Amino acid sequence: MATKSHALPEITAYRSVPEFAYGRIKDIRIRWALEEIGQPYRTRLIGGIFEDKAPAYLADQPFGQVPVYRQGDLILFESGSILIHIGDTDARLLPSDAMGRGRAISWMIAALNSVEPMIQTLVALTVKGQGTDWLAGAMDAAKPFAEQRLARLSQALGNRDWLEEHFSIGDIVMIDVLRNASPQLLAPHPNLAAYVARGTARPAFQSAMAAHLADCAVAAPLPA
Amino acid sequence: MATKSHALPEITAYRSVPEFAYGRIKDIRIRWALEEIGQPYRTRLIGGIFEDKAPAYLADQPFGQVPVYRQGDLILFESGSILIHIGDTDARLLPSDAMGRGRAISWMIAALNSVEPMIQTLVALTVKGQGTDWLAGAMDAAKPFAEQRLARLSQALGNRDWLEEHFSIGDIVMIDVLRNASPQLLAPHPNLAAYVARGTARPAFQSAMAAHLADCAVAAPLPA
């Protein structure tokens, strides 16, 4: 693998996360993209997901999340922004013509803003509402938003392998978002389940996930 | 105002929306950006927010949302993707150096993926849960996510006018996202309230909002 830049990119990742988040932190998206183009990188591990972040970390990542991406003087946050930056260096991740580029970015942002939030709301309500009397009512209200988005996505994907003709950063984010959908949500859409299986079978995803899991432990549960 | 491209850009917008969405549809973000750089555009009105979308519309916008952006052969969806495309044509919206560009895009995606979803969940629960016995419990569980993100955003903004040194597409999206936060959510953060006031006082926002409202009626309530 050739180094494509003088400064080796560095990403941050968590040292430990609670069980529900294990294997699901967003540095996977960046690792996956870098593996796809054979770009080596360095990892800087930071404290657990619920630990207070140092002021210096918040200066780089205002919301205290991972990953932060650093390459020389350039410091970026938000996986979507980092993926556009990496994609701009390699057409295997982001086509360089205006149309192909625009469509891939449209899909990536659709994953971040029109699909992930509806799935993430269900995850958050489930985690926070376990054993409460409001969970069932809130889930019944929130689920149709996610179901509608997945139905539309399934229709748009049809029987294609990827969202557009070629694999792109749009697929990286959409597939990682769909990994967090419950099996029940995906069940009506075999083409979406196959799409996730196809993406996560890529050697670059497999290497990225192995590195992600090697860096991260399951945290002890919080005191009740 | 000089036309900056041979093909006049066209965006879609709704002919009518329910009262809670009036003045809050995402075509505002694109109108605002185009007004900032004096780029004329055309509007194509489509049916109401809950109407079934024609198959031809879903081919352009897989989730049936607005806006779709069309310029010559280029068809883009998702306001964030459209704003990157427009920003790439004018440094007043998106700096052209790697650092400035990367930071502005990071902030825009933070608005779309790390702030808007937490605020939107509260809006959706409130609309769907009115009068139910689960609303209070679900809101108590969901509110801390939004509160934490606004606290971090307030800290990052500090006493600056904009998220970075210059106004950018990051501010356009963040300010529009914050317009949907309830007054109670913003109350602990006077600098965020002032930031929204500063952004919405810009002549370009005012023109964009006037055009948006001129195109859109309040829909009759759905039958109970």
Image (tube, coloured by chain):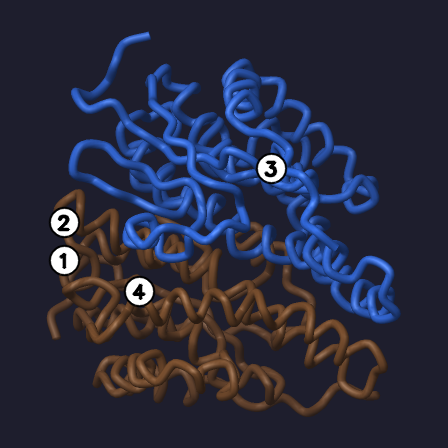
Chain colours: A brown, B blue
Residue highlighted by disc 2: A96
Per the rendering, the mark at residue A91 is: 1
Task: Determine which quarter of the picture holds residue A224.
Answer: bottom right
Q: Please rate how many residues cluster around mark 3, counting C-alpha atoms within 10 Å: few if below 14, some from 14 to 19, many from 20.
A: some
Q: Please rate how many residues cluster around mark 2, counting C-alpha atoms within 10 Å: few if below 14, some from 14 to 19, many from 20.
A: some
Residue highlighted by disc 3: B24
Task: Determine which quarter of the picture holds residue A86.
Answer: bottom left
- Left or right of A97 in this view: B29: right
Task: Determine which quarter of the picture holds residue A196.
Answer: bottom left
Label 2 with label 4: CB-CB less than 8 Å: no
Measured as percent of width and height from the top left, residue A47 is found at 59, 75
- Of badges 1 and 3, the one in the foreground is 3
Residue highlighted by disc 4: A156
Quick one: A163 or B219, which is closer to the camera? Answer: B219
SS type, badge 1: loop
- Of badges 3 and 2, the one in the foreground is 3
Q: Chain of mark 1?
A: A
Label 1 and label 3: CA atoms lie apart by: 36 Å
Measured as percent of width and height from the top left, residue A93 is found at 20, 62
- Of badges 2 and 4, the one in the foreground is 4
Label 2 and label 4: CA atoms lie apart by: 23 Å
